[in-house]
Image (cartoon, grey):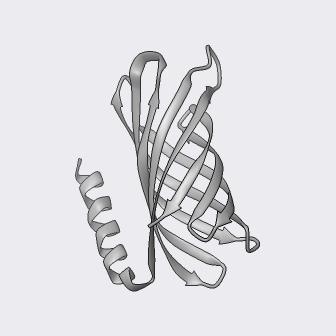
Amino acid sequence: MKKILCLVAFLAMASSAFAQDGKLRIGANIGFTTGSGDSSFVIGGDVDYLFNVDSRFDVGAATGLAVVTTGNSIILPLAGAGRFKATDKIDLGLDMGYAIGINNAGNGFYFRPIFEYKLQSNIALRASYSGVDSGGFLNAGVMFSL
């Protein structure tokens, strides 16, 4: 629990230090689990706060919820986020951190490679893989800048 509180405090300080350059985004996604066993449906929500490091690179924090329908597992990721602006329309990203299993899910290392295609300046389509230790899920969704 101390690790989580330290991470939240660090992210709060980092986001307040760069508040003038920050961008808050929210989104939703759907997908399916990968790995051994039966595939399960996954529905989730995403929140990230990013600020510009330079014209092509953003960093910040990311979180959200992922609900795996089989077994009603809920995963809460707490991650650092990085985005590279490959073109005017395409962003490549990576979220890395720790996932907390809330209901019938295990805790563990979290990573999420991301591909985003911008439809407009404030709307992007997102495809990603979310991995938690030995399992994971593929998902697709949409992100909105506030």
Q: Which residue is pictured at 37% across the width and 22% down the height?
A: 104
Q: Is residue 44 above or below residue 53?
A: above
**How far from the left and from the top, in percent, is residue 87?**
76, 72
Q: Quadrant of residue 21?
A: bottom left
Q: Is residue 99 left or right of residue 132?
A: left
Q: Quadrant of the C terminus?
A: bottom left
Q: What is the number of callouts on the image? A: 0
Residue lying farthest to the top in this orientation? 38
**How far from the left and from the top, in percent, is residue 25?**
47, 62
Q: Is residue 111 left or right of residue 97?
A: right
**How far from the left and from the top, in percent, is residue 122?**
56, 67
Q: Nearer the viewer, residue 84 or 98?
A: 84
Q: Which residue is pictured at 57% across the width and 42% down the height?
A: 130
Q: Is residue 97 above or below residue 92?
A: above
Q: Nearer the viewer, residue 40 or 136?
A: 40
Is residue 78 shown to the viewer in this render? no
**How far from the left and from the top, in percent, is residue 132?**
52, 38
Q: Quadrant of residue 131?
A: top right
Q: Quadrant of residue 79?
A: bottom left
Q: Is residue 109 above or below residue 7?
A: above
Q: Which residue is pictured at 68% across the width and 62% down the height?
A: 119
Q: Which residue is pictured at 64% across the width and 53% down the height?
A: 125
